[in-house]
Amino acid sequence: MLNPHKQAVKQLESVAELLEVAYSEKKRFWQAIEKLKEPDRVYKTELEVGGKKYPAFRSQHDNSRGPYKGGIRFHPGVTEAEVKALSTWMTWKCAVVGIPYGGGKGGVVVDPRKLSSEELQELSRAYARWLQDKIGPWQDIPAPDVNTNGQIMAWMVDEWQQAYLENHGVLTENALATFTGKPLALGGSQGREEATGLGGVYVLEKLAEKQGWTRKQDITIAIQGFGNVGYWFAYHADKLGYKVVAVSDSKGGVYLAEGLDPVKTLECKQQMGKVTQCHCTTKGCSTQAGRVITNEELLELEVDVLVPAALESVIHKDNAKKIKAKFIIEMANGPVTPEADKILLANDTTVIPDILANAGGVTVSYFEWVQNLAGYYWSYDEVLAKLKPLMDQAFDQMWRMKKEHSVSARIATYMSAVKKVVDALMIRGKV
Ligand code: NAD
């Protein structure tokens, strides 16, 4: 299997071949593609906490459409190739939804469960201090990712501001706008928590429009993962009248033919510690209402829409043939492997790719940055109302590209994104 960065480059090359016809200046077009194969730069260091050293990275892929933007993950499996690939995908994701950012990504090779709370804070502060002059509101704007959260962003804001003051003597940059995904108590945005799941449901609504699904109550949905993204997807889909028939977490799942109630299921999961015992409909929770299923069974259910919202690579060459859903909305990052993608395409399954489906999160991060820069904060309803047109527009652009070039939704999404970045590089005269 290719390392993730080589995979990202291969993906770019195949999309470029399809896009080339639209450009009269072929040489400049291919110069732009070459430039986009590698990040602009990757910073590397080792951060020392409690006598131990932790390798740390920040990759800045491309900023032709705006400052670099992307999360910071704390995970033992972080590698330079992964961070480079993720920063490339962030460039595409921001372009897909048309927000004025390029792509960045950071990571520290660490198992945060092995750190005390003090050590976690020390590591987070060390990371922000190391990047003091390399990130900033007009330069590169990090956010939470795997194993990082609002608290960690708050520590980073504080440390970055302190380091800035020490280095410059006076604070002339906006520390709050340097990080997103912050708690509401420190410049966070209303609606950020549910933005990714809700953005995915806006995509579902667009799909329904294109497919002419008029009776939403007949459209069945299975969701793998019942964390932040899975829950909010279930909540909003249910609220709009779709029938969520299955959800799961790491311990297994539950199937209810008549449709489950996401709110009651969450309350029950919080009490029981898992969803397998939560057979909850609008009438209440009873084990007679449904049946327990494994995560593998959930993926293979006969439903209209399958929503992987937990882990990467869960749909692979060995189970892709068994997927019965005709539509997959990728809410997790990379849940379908490239081999599985080919099998699904051959089976006429439409896969709405992660960089479009889960872009609601980074879009509300953008709103957070705008609010921090303006010092003026929007209500929950305003945030949600601003998210919808951006998701709708991204979906429509993808759909047009899909029809025009007779390609898959994934290829169409990448074509739409890469085109915007290449155009920005050209118009700037960078190539
Ligand atoms: P989370 O930790 O809140 O939830 C993850 C869920 O997956 C939990 O319900 C967990 O029990 C479940 N899970 C773990 N192992 C599993 C397994 N083996 N089988 C089935 N379920 C399993 O995480 P999240 O924030 O909801 O993120 C989910 C996915 O969405 C990740 O791929 C993440 O990168 C992606 N994503 C999240 C956001 C965001 O804003 N939170 C934005 C973009 C992408």
Image (cartoon, helix red, strand yellow):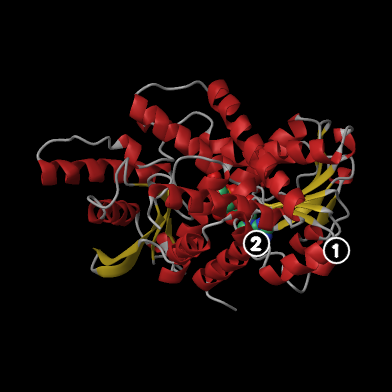
* Label located before the other in sequence (2 or 1): 2
Please tell me whether residue 163 is drawn above or below residue 111 in the rendered image: above
Residue 347 badge: 1
Frontmost residue, 326 versus 298: 326
Image position of 53 with respect to 310: above or below: below
Disc 2, SS: helix
247 lies left or right of 178: right
Q: Amino acid at mark 2?
A: Leu
Give the x, y percent position of residue 38: 42, 66
Mark 2 → mark 1, Cα distance in angstroms = 22 Å
Q: Position of 376 compared to 321: left or right?
A: left
Where's residue 251, x and y in %?
Answer: 68, 58
Q: Amino acid at mark 1?
A: Asn
Give 389 or 57, whichever is nearer the viewer. 389
The residue that appears at 84% across and 54% down in the rendered structure is 326
Secondary structure beneath label 1: loop
Q: Which mark is residue 18?
A: 2
